[in-house]
Image (cartoon, rainbow, N blue to C red):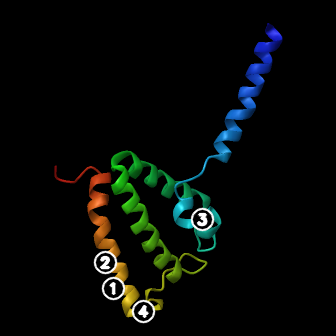
Amino acid sequence: MKKRMLAGIATVAILIPSAALAASYLADNIFSSSATIEQHGGTQEDYQEIEGMLQAAKDKLTENEFKEYVGLTKQLMQLKLKITDENGVQHEEKLTKDEQQQYEQLASKLVPYFKKINGIAKP
């Protein structure tokens, strides 16, 4: 009986960390991996912070709102990555006029979601 219990505890001790490492990150939907952020001057901590923000959004938004939020955020981040160099410095002049307009539109579409996530949206 003791051997089974020890074997069970050992199995759980091995499987739980493995499951945590195998879990997919919400941020992967936007950046593919943390390496993308690191190539643009970010850190693993930045990636984890973004993951935390996405987790908060998932908890506070409806399923449809979250899908829309992630889609808009992904588009916005693609533009941000385009203008951000390996030191994390943004060069907005790299955007065309159409991309600048798209950037502004995406940012304005995200405002209501940010308000809801941060709890300042009007009921």
Kind of residue at badge 2: Gln
Judging by the rendered image, the residue that carries numbered circle 3 is 32
Distance, label 2 to label 4, CA atoms, is 14 Å
Q: Are marks 1 and 2 in contact (CB under 8 Å)?
A: yes
The one of 44 and 29 positioned closer to us in this rendering: 29
Secondary structure under tag 1 reads helix
Q: Residue at 23% of width from left, 53% of height from top?
A: 120
Residue 23 vertical position relative to residue 37 in the rendered view, above or below = above
Q: Residue at 50% of width from left, 83% of height from top?
A: 83
Q: Position of residue 23 (x, y in %)?
A: 62, 46
Distance, label 1 to label 3, CA atoms, is 25 Å
Among the two numbered marks 1 and 3 on one chain, the one whose residue lies closer to the N terminus? 3
Among the two numbered marks 3 and 4 on one chain, the one whose residue lies closer to the N terminus? 3
Distance, label 3 to label 4, CA atoms, is 25 Å
Q: Residue furthest right?
A: 3
Judging by the rendered image, the residue that carries numbered circle 4 is 96
Q: Residue furthest left?
A: 123
Q: Position of residue 42 (x, y in %)?
A: 58, 67
Secondary structure under tag 4 reads loop
Q: Position of residue 60 (x, y in %)?
A: 34, 47
The local crowd at label 4, few if under 14, some if 14 to 19, many if 20 or more residues have their Cα within 10 Å, is few
Tell me, for residue 101, which label it has, or none. 1
Distance, label 1 to label 4, CA atoms, is 9 Å
Residue 88 vertical position relative to residue 10 in the rendered view, above or below = below
Q: Position of residue 74 (x, y in %)?
A: 46, 68
The one of 97 and 64 positioned closer to us in this rendering: 64
State the quadrant of the N terminus: top right
